[in-house]
Amino acid sequence: QISVTMDNKALSYLLQCWQKFRPSWDNPMQFVLACVSYAVGLGNVWRFPYLCQMHGGGGFMIPYLIMLFVEGIPLFYMELAIGQKMRLGSIGAWSAISPYLGGLGIASVVTSLYLCLYYNVINAWSFWYLFHSFQAVLPWSDCPVNSNRTAYLEECEVATPTQYFFFRETLNISSSIDENGGVHMGLALCLLLAWLIVYLFIVKGVKSTGKVVYFTATFPYVVLIIYLIRGVTLHGALNGVKYMFTPKMEQLANPQTWINAATQIFFSLGLGFGSLIAFASYNHHNNNFENQAITVSLINSGTSIFASIVTFSIYGFKATFNYESCLERMRLLLMNTFELAEDTVHIDNISFWITDLNRTQPEQIAAIASRIETCSLEAELDTAVEGTGLAFIVYSEAIKNMPAAQLWSVLYFFMLLLLGMGSMLGNVTAIITPLRDFKVLAHSLSNETLNGLVCLFCLLLGFGFTTRSGNYWFTMFNEYGATFSLLFIVLLEIVTVSYIYGLKRFEKDIEDMLGRRPNWYWKIMWVAVSPLLLISLFVFYILNYIQGGAPTYQAWDKDVVREELTQIRLGLRSDSEISCVNLCAYSHIEMTVTRKSIFFDLQL
Amino acid sequence: MWTVWTVWMVWMVCLVPTTSEALCTEDDGYKVRLSIKTALGGDAYEWNESEMFFFKATLAFAMRTYSGGEQYDVSNILVCDETLRVSFVFVVTKPSNTSELVPRTEVENAIKKSRHRINSAFLLTDQTLDFVGINPTLAAPIQYDTPPWLIAFGVVMGLVCAGIVALLVSTFLNKKRSKKSADEEEAGRGNGILCESIRGKDGLFNQGLVDDDRLTKL
């Protein structure tokens, strides 16, 4: 290495020149809103309420909050620190920390690329539903009729209209991942629109992103508040909210609860993708990211809890509606079979009537026994759904029963779009920031062209998800594509920062930026607690994978009209990112042996 | 024997008026169920003789409409098995011969044709005025010239494309303008020249390897 000595004035002048070339946020608020927009995404709306329901309602808050303070905030703080200090995207930043770890940055970029490919498909679905809400009658409220108008289509009769609309009309789903089918033109158009909007938001890099996040970060909260008010005033909403908040403390003894809490915090904050490093790299050197890290993490968790109140009031409404429909059906059945007058049978005294009739006319009761259903509100509330099923099927079903359904539908899908778009901004920034750091690309292509090429590339590959088997590919990517590699990436990150780079150097860097050293709490978390937690999560995932056998997915069986578990013969290799880390470390060793490394060189 | 014959005659005389009721069976006619209170709630009307007369008249109307003018009358509609549920069975006799029944299929078609009128007469719907065995014809799906979703899509797409074009054009114009002013600045040789020349060189500042000890203290 060649060392250069220079005086104060020349050094500060050089630093100023260099800082001029990197664009930055107009003000710190834009950075905070960008992080909020990225972290607060669809997972807050459709994953957290499900976990809450599965793991004992109000009791789930305890592991969730513990994991937030022990794992979430320290790791978030660390990523922001690295980005702000190195002022480079993930590849450059990790190469700068240790030349052997350039692969870590590449792994982050590849993971972000996978995410970009399939995540925007959800936005395409949201657009599809949004545009279909501009009709007098919502298309998922009724089944379509058959050709001679005598009955509804059979597939729709057996399933529900909302399921039919999602699986048949939106996805036109095939029976297995092997049957490709053609591209669904409507969805392809919506995907094109989604990518054009992403391009519009990031075309000028952080200058355009910074303005967009004012809207994408704040408007979802407006919609959530409106929905909260609408939700709690719905009939039966309080059943759902009571159900959610009733803690079932025995769930805390279940280790799965703690694992799910840790995983949820981890993925919800978007650690390991390189987006946080990319966002922070556009900060000024002395930006107070410590307070910002705590603020954004707390806002993210708060939004999850807030969104789950909304979700549970909607659940309560839907469950009560189904329960009362069930009772109404039973009432009609009794009235019609036994020719009872209308005002003698109410939904309150159905069970009384059944026991009475069982005594007096048991043969007739036996004759209709197959059609008698036991209506239970608890059973309706217990049906927990997560993911796209919750967002596109359960919610649409609840919305179609609300008065002024079109308005609520438009509002809801617009909110989903904003949440999805906000997260996409982070995902795409995580790819283009490291690419721009390569001087070759930066000089030959302008900002707009590079961003356009990245979007075009992702769009073309994304068309694969709009085919008839696209949903199965989506499920594959969602469940197996990023989870495992992210754990590996973040584990490596924290081990690198704490042990390879050295905690002392890291502390000094932070002091340099903030003017004070991080206190003992952060240090204990970075050095001991978070790595241990991540290692145990990692080990758990490996064990689960080994025990689980061949990976499976739910396939839509057209004849049975239900999702059935199917094994896949193709595998998605999530170790592709891990191999990046190894490959790059190896190639660097070769290069240092054969070449002198000069102080000003960017190390690949 | 004369007493036996008288008893038999009396019995036959008593039986004759009931033959009309013998015509009214569910196999030859249709069962009807009305759920008035479910449909109308507080505004529900009482089911009584007048309402039954109205119903018979409506059915007669339906038969007249279907048969193209044959003089069906209220007396041609026979009703039996009335229950508190408000359900009953009816059959339709031919106007020409009151002991002959109109076939079931004809009755069904007649009702299907005028179903909407019958429902409206009683302020009920297909579900609350139930003819057991006659499935309601479902409403035809609304046909649009252009699907409405495509219109909404077109609007948003147009706005987005306009936005992108506007941004790209403004960037291009800005670059041209700044290039012109940079050419003018060359003559002046301002302070920025050192920064520009550094920018042209290979390499990037690698702050990670900045080793404080090798530089003089700030």
Image (tube, rainbow, N blue to C red):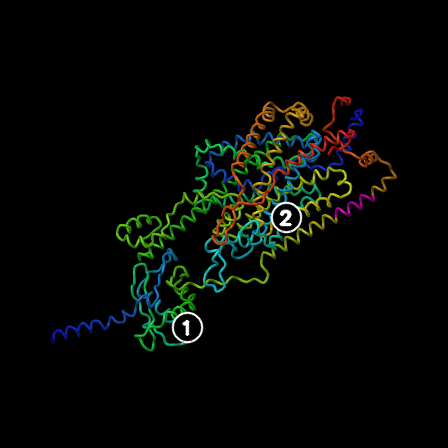
Q: Which mark is drawn over residue A313?
A: none
| Majority SS type along the magenta span | helix
Q: Position of residue A327 (x, y in %)?
A: 38, 50
Chain identifier of the residue bearing label 1 in the image: B
Pick the residue in front: A266 or B45: A266
The number of callouts visible is: 2
Residue at numbered disc 1: B66
* Residue B74, quarter of the rendered image: bottom left
Q: Which residues are magenta?
A: B170-180
Q: Nearer the viewer, mark 2 or mark 1?
A: 2
* Residue A335, quarter of the rendered image: bottom left
How many neighbours does mark 2 have within 10 angstroms: few (below 14), some (14-19), or many (20 or more)?
many
Residue at numbered disc 2: A462
Amino acid at circle 1? Tyr
Name the element at disc 1.
helix
Q: Is residue B59 visible?
A: yes
Name the element at disc 2.
helix
Work out whether B74 lies above or below A429. below
Amino acid at circle 2? Gly
Quadrant where the C terminus of chain B sits is top right
Q: Is residue A25 left or right of residue A263?
A: right
Q: Is residue A29 visible?
A: no
Work out whether A373 lies above or below A288. below
